[in-house]
Amino acid sequence: MPFDSLGLAPALVQAAAESGYAAPTAIQAAAIPAILQGRDVRGSAQTGSGKTAAFSLPLLQRLSSERAAQAEGPRRVRALVLVPTRELAAQVGETLRSLAQHLPERLKIVVAFGGVSINPQMMGLRGGADIVVATPGRLLDLVEHNALRLAAVSTLVLDEADRLFDLGFAEELGRILALLPAKRQNLLFSATFPPAIQALADGMLHEPAVIDVQGEPGTEPNIVQRVIEVDAIRRTQLLRHLLKQHEGEWDRVLVFVATQHAAQIVAEKLYKNGIYAVPFHGDIAQGTRTDILSQFKQSRWDVVIATDLAARGIDIAQLPVVINYDLPRSPTDYIHRIGRTGRAGESGLAISFVSASTEAHFQLIEKRQGLSLPRERIEGFEPTEVAVPVTDASGTGGVKGKRPSKKDKLRAAAKAAQAGGDNNGNDGGL
Ligand code: AMP
């Protein structure tokens, strides 16, 4: 099915073609017509499957035709796109601008996120804007500075919606929703909608088109998942070994760790060993964060050691390998992390390091995905640790006579996530 059969304006079809989009992806084919009809949408589709364009194209179409009808009117923010991280805000803004480039009516798209001076963003909002793409905290700051009003928003997009409903954002999201007109179009997109979040999400949708193209033939991301057993203490050495072994083949590698501290330490160790590795987390200044990501995309860095800050939405073309040095705290995070590879139909490889104490947690991740992956051992790195029996239901091992139930394990994982450091909260996303 070609793009022009979806009811999109020729200028948007042309921009899609110039972006290299030959045909709509499954989520685009399903969501674009529903959005053009003005319906609320809850859309889930695999990581890297074109969700941004799925909401951007119809949004631009409507705003552009409204602008044509009212060319002389003041610019009022008619579409608000909320995202959980600064990097994603910049990325979505770029996609919108690039897809809007041939529209006959110029639409003003303003991107706003924290960690950088608010003044240029306030200046950017002078004279109004058609679309604002923002992280929640900075958006509220701008509202408090009277830099923008949200009373005319007719479409709200929540990208990575389940993350925005998480505890870390719930309060800010509530405050933002209270500033929006009650009558509006709501578009919620993510690769994952855990059941509890789904109920929250559905509470704000009005007769939505529920689009779930996960699992449709041909839509699965092409990601090979491997699991390597290794003692926790030897993971950096194993990482180094793998990077050296695959030099020239793995030209870019994204490694996930659990804390900012671990990101620093692992990156330093690799760097000292001649590997171009750099840490990426919420405690790094925003300018540096932006530079690291763009330099990674330009192959200036070979390896980025990141917290879950990099797990959501970030689109790095030709990222062949993602490594879970530390396991993610939830099966949902696992899906997002590995989804940084194998994007837009490319193939990818996701490797997870598992040790005696994390094996039970990985089994939960596998179970949630209906997978059972073979465990591998690498010569010279065979594990020697054995699981330490625990007396509580922490899910890290079994105790004779009191094996933690699945619920216990999930509770323990949720508790660990709440207690966790930067891996848990916004990690500077605002
Ligand atoms: P997203 O899921 O929106 O982050 O998109 C993932 C990647 O797919 C991005 O690099 C997009 O440029 C690309 N993409 C989006 N739509 C299409 C399409 N119809 N055909 C090919 N690539 C696409």
Image (spheres, rainbow, N blue to C red):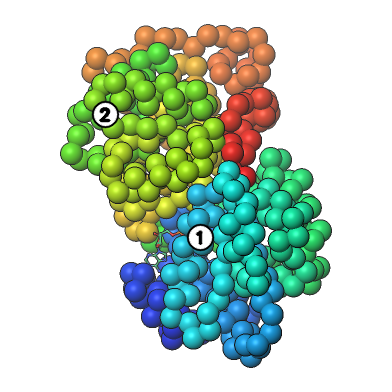
**Residue 174 x, y percent position in the rendering:** 78, 52
Q: Residues within 10 Å of mark 1 (few under 14, many from 20)?
A: many
Q: Is residue 391 above or below residue 312?
A: above
Residue designated by label 1: 92
Left/right of residue 335 with respect to residue 123 in the rendered view: left
Under mark 2, the amino acid is Ile
Q: Quadrant of the N terminus?
A: bottom left
Q: Residue 262 in the image: state x and y as whole percent.
A: 46, 23
Q: Position of residue 137 (x, y in %)?
A: 68, 48
Q: Which quarter is ligand 1 in?
A: bottom left
Residue 299 seen in the current view: yes
Residue 278, quarter of the rendered image: top left
Depth check: 248 or 272 in front?
A: 272
- On screen, 272 above or below 109? above
Q: How many marks?
A: 2
- Residue underneath mark 2: 275
What is the secondary structure assignment of the residue under circle 1?
A: helix
Q: Is residue 157 left or right of residue 296?
A: right
Instruction: Residue 378: tell me if it is visible.
Output: no
Is 166 above or below relative to 278?
A: below
Instruction: Tell me the element at label 2.
Output: loop
- Residue plotted at (29% across, 21% down): 272
